[in-house]
């Protein structure tokens, strides 16, 4: 009887250890809370299986709860959205927005805001570098066809307006576009933001 | 023929699974409408009331997400069995959201029922 209890406890510990291995992205308190809840669930399910006459109630309970790696992955999916809303990483924010696209309009808006915003920032950044290496080809141009920003291969009476300050102007604009996009994306991907509520209402 | 039939059967199961998956948030929020419940109790209620046999490992990550979204709150309560249980209940925002989801569901299901009426008629 004692041997069986020890074996059951070992089986639960081994299962929970495998769940914990997949919960590295959570802080210690959250990991502990998840594991405690799983442990209680396993014990209560094992009691149920025992009452039904199972010869291996703990094993049956663990089987019913499923593969610990898959379980941990499902929890990890939940944490990605929360981490992204606290992150300043464009890559993480864009990846989260892309995942959210399947959930509806909110995800779509987030993804396209990210894509357009970061592309704009990148374009300004490339413009700044272009001015550094090809000062005659990159600039803020004004001519018979209106105003143009960037590189012109053939000049048709266009005149460069910004001069050397084009480089600094482009860097500032790249920073502003990147920062605004990041802030907007953080709002859009957070689970409870006013834009999130607004978008859910509109959906 | 066998493959085609198997394909159709798989498609049917996949469709049903997708349908159930799409309703999970609503059914979990709805089962908590009247009282606070803990994980295993939620599973049992879903099974008894709605005939939903939800995979046990699926429930807890959903509860966690709904809590993060501010729709649920949880508290640990000491139980007579000796195991403390984590009880979930709807927040104010959660109740509002459940009400709206319920309304959307009603409109959706009524529309689908109207659409399916001729199919049911011809099946008789």
Image (spheres, rainbow, N blue to C red):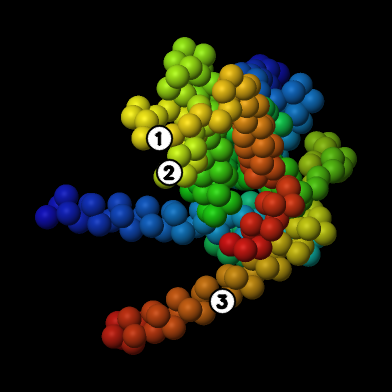
Please report the residue visible at 54 percent of the width from the left and 21 percent of the height from the top. A128
Look at mark 3 in the image and give the residue it sits on. Answer: B107
The label nearer to you, 3 versus 1, is 1
Question: Helix, strand or loop at disc 2?
Answer: loop
Residue A76: where, in percent of width, then height?
A: 60, 31
Q: Is residue A19 visible?
A: no
Q: Which residue is nearer to you in this view: A48 or A15?
A: A15
Distance of label 3 from label 2 (alpha carbons): 57 Å
Residue A22: where, in percent of width, then height?
A: 59, 23
Tell whether B92 sits left or right of A40: right
Residue A113: where, in percent of width, then height?
A: 56, 43
Q: Are marks 3 and 1 on the same chain?
A: no
The correct choice, above or below, for A111 with respect to A76 in the image is below
The correct choice, above or below, for A156 with respect to A109 in the image is above
**Residue at the far left in the pictured view:** B1
Please report the residue visible at 64 percent of the width from the left and 73 percent of the height from the top. B103
Look at mark 1 in the image and give the residue it sits on. Answer: A157
Look at mark 2 in the image and give the residue it sits on. Answer: A144
Question: Helix, strand or loop at disc 3?
Answer: helix
- Quarter of the image for the N terminus of chain B: give it: bottom left
Q: Residues within 10 Å of mark 1 (few under 14, many from 20)?
A: few
Please report the residue visible at 54 percent of the width from the left and 54 percent of the height from the top. A105
The correct choice, above or below, for A69 with respect to B7 in the image is above
Distance of label 3 from label 1 (alpha carbons): 62 Å
The label nearer to you, 3 versus 2, is 2
Quarter of the view holding residue A28: top right
Tell whether B77 sits left or right of A130: right
């Amino acid at each position: 009887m004692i041997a069986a209890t020890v074996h059951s406890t070992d089986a639960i510990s081994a299962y929970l250890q495998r769940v914990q291995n997949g919960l590295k992205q959570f802080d210690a308190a959250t990991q502990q809370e998840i594991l405690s809840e799983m442990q209680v669930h396993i014990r209560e399910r094992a009691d149920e299986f025992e009452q039904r006459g199972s010869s291996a109630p703990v094993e049956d309970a663990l089987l019913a709860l499923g593969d610990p790696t898959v379980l941990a992955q499902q929890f990890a999916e939940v944490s990605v959205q929360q981490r992204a809303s606290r992150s300043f990483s464009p890559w993480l924010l864009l990846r989260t927005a892309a995942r959210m696209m399947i959930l509806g309009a909110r995800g779509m808006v987030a993804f396209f805001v990210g894509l357009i915003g970061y592309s704009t920032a990148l374009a300004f950044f490339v413009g700044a570098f272009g001015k550094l290496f090809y000062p005659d080809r990159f600039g803020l141009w004004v001519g018979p066809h209106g105003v143009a920003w960037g590189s012109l291969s053939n000049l048709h009476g266009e005149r460069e307006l910004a001069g050397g300050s084009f480089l600094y102007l482009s860097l500032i604009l790249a920073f502003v576009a990147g920062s605004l996009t990041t802030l907007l994306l953080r709002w859009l991907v957070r689970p409870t933001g006013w834009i999130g509520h607004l978008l859910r209402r509109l959906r | 023929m066998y493959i085609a039939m198997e394909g159709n059967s798989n498609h049917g199961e996949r469709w049903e699974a997708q349908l159930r998956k799409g309703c999970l948030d609503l059914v979990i929020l709805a089962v908590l409408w009247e009282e606070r419940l803990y994980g295993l109790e939620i599973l049992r209620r879903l099974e008894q009331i709605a005939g939903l046999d939800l995979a046990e490992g699926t429930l807890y990550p959903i509860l966690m997400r709904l809590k993060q979204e501010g729709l649920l709150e949880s508290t640990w309560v000491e139980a007579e069995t000796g195991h403390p249980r984590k009880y979930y209940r709807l927040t104010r925002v959660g109740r509002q959201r459940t009400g709206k989801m319920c309304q959307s569901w009603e409109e959706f299901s009524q529309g689908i029922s109207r659409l399916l009426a001729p199919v049911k008629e011809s099946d008789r």
